[in-house]
Amino acid sequence: LSDRLSGIFDKLTRRGALTDSDVSEAMREVRRALIEADVALDVVKSFTDRVKEKAVGQEVVRSVTPGQMVVKIVHDELVRTLGAEAEPIDLQSVPPVPIMMVGLQGSGKTTTTAKIAKRLTERDKRKVLMASLDTRRPAAQEQLEVLGKQTGVDTLPIIKGQTPQQIATRAIQAAKLGGYDVVILDTAGRLHIDDELMRETEQVRDIAQPHETLLVADSLTGQDAVNLARTFDQRIGITGIVLTRIDGDGRGGAALSMRAVTGKPIKLLGTGEKLDGLEDFHPERVAGRILGMGDVVSLVERAAENIDQEKAQAMAKKLAKGQFDLQDLSDQFRQMQKIGGMSGVLGMLPGIGKMKKQLDAANLDDKLLKRQTAIISSMTTQERRNPKVLQASRKRRIAAGSGTTVQEVNQLLKMHRQMADMMKVVGKGKGGLAKLFGIG
Ligand code: GDP
Ligand code: MG
């Protein structure tokens, strides 16, 4: 998107304030990007109207292009709409604090119940009781019991034949008697919103009087997100939203839709099937995802502060072709240290989450960066340009020269090879490095 917008504005040589027609043209691109990200249509419209109102008449700051200016305004408005900062689960109430999970079947309620319980137990040292009110789906109560065993969190003993309302009553009582801090009620879902579901959930709400009512929704929910959020909020009254499957292909448009129609905060993100796949919501990340540019905005901001632009472009070209040698790697290490380390930079690029994990696993910290820089310093120019010449005896010499081991030299060479391969792929891909540095 940022490229497309820049394209439009590159045609304008004039400086000064953004005019109505400049902005209208840009908003067509923004609208397309939002629709591609599955943001609901009426939300798209009110959003672009708001941005337009803010943008028209704004002076274009010197040293940025009108295109960059609009991208920044769009980005900032997205972040503002999504809710400027993360809001945690609120436990400020008399224990046991009831939390009710609501949503459609398969949205991830039961999994999220266990994830939240695990986090509250392990991180916040709370005593948590979980109870499944799902009497519809066979084995739903057993599913939660299994998750309880896995996480070491207590679950309400199952009594077959009880209604959801009876289970809710029993759960609250058990939580009071057992001295629990928090009791999480995992309600039954339906395939679609129906009146029966809503009535049942309303009754459970009246019994449990939840302090937090979290709507769990699949982030892949497209145009339905608005109706879903609006209905649950009107009938049940939600206090927050949990978006699951953020690890999937969805671009997070549902986040914007649901937040916009309910005004309720998105509190948490489900990032995987595993029980530690739970993250706080960061509006900036989701805004970047919706605009399809990773965290490019912040990367550009930080990079502009620290990196010599020309050097970065030359480097990006080399990286994109996968032609970068150990000398480049050493230069790069120095730059990386300035902007939050290698994993910090890669983590901001779209589609690199996995690689980042590998780098984290490789413990690519500052100390390691320094050792690796030392290894490269102990090489001859020829060796740096063409690592293939490095035979065992040369490796021993380099290890001795840099105060490291042959094993560490090998690790560095392996990492360089992997990075060169990865850069080739990323460099070619949409939103890759070349594009990022504006040379794509
Ligand atoms: P419920 O019907 O709302 O209780 O949904 P479940 O908790 O049973 O989840 C349905 C399926 O979605 C299960 O296979 C979960 O493992 C999976 N799931 C839940 N949350 C996530 C998530 O954040 N990411 C991924 N990839 N899968 C999830
Ligand atoms: Mg369930």
Image (cartoon, grey):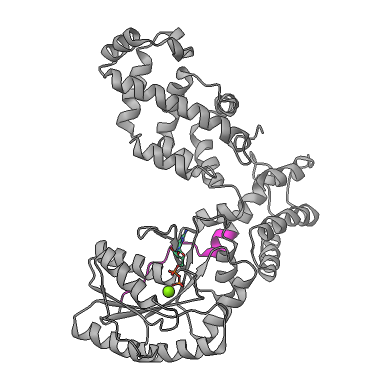
Image coordinates of residue 43 in percent, x first then y, are 66, 69
* Identity of the residue drawn at 38% across and 90% down: 163
Q: What kind of secondary structure does the magenta stretch mostly adopt? A: loop
Within the image, what quadrant is residue 255 found in?
bottom right
Give the camera-side residue of 62 and 41: 41
Image coordinates of residue 395 in percent, x first then y, are 33, 12
Question: Magenta includes 83?
Answer: yes
* Identity of the residue drawn at 46% across and 89% down: 200
Location of residue 364 with respect to 193 vertically, above or below: above
Give the camera-side residue of 38 and 336: 38
Residue reaching furthest left? 178
Question: Magenta includes 152?
Answer: no
Location of residue 287 with respect to 300 vertically, above or below: below
Image quadrant holding the C terminus, namely top right
Within the image, what quadrant is residue 172 found in?
bottom left
Q: Which residues are magenta?
A: 78-92
Left or right: 78 with respect to 84? right
Image coordinates of residue 56 in percent, x first then y, are 72, 57
Is residue 90 in view? Answer: no
Is residue 77 in view? Answer: yes
Give the camera-side residue of 336 and 396: 396
Location of residue 62 with respect to 92 vertically, above or below: above
Residue reaching furthest front? 138
Q: Quick check: which quadrant has ligand 1?
A: bottom left
* Identity of the residue drawn at 30% across and 73% down: 145
Image coordinates of residue 237 in percent, x first then y, are 48, 83
* Identity of the residue drawn at 28% across and 64% down: 150
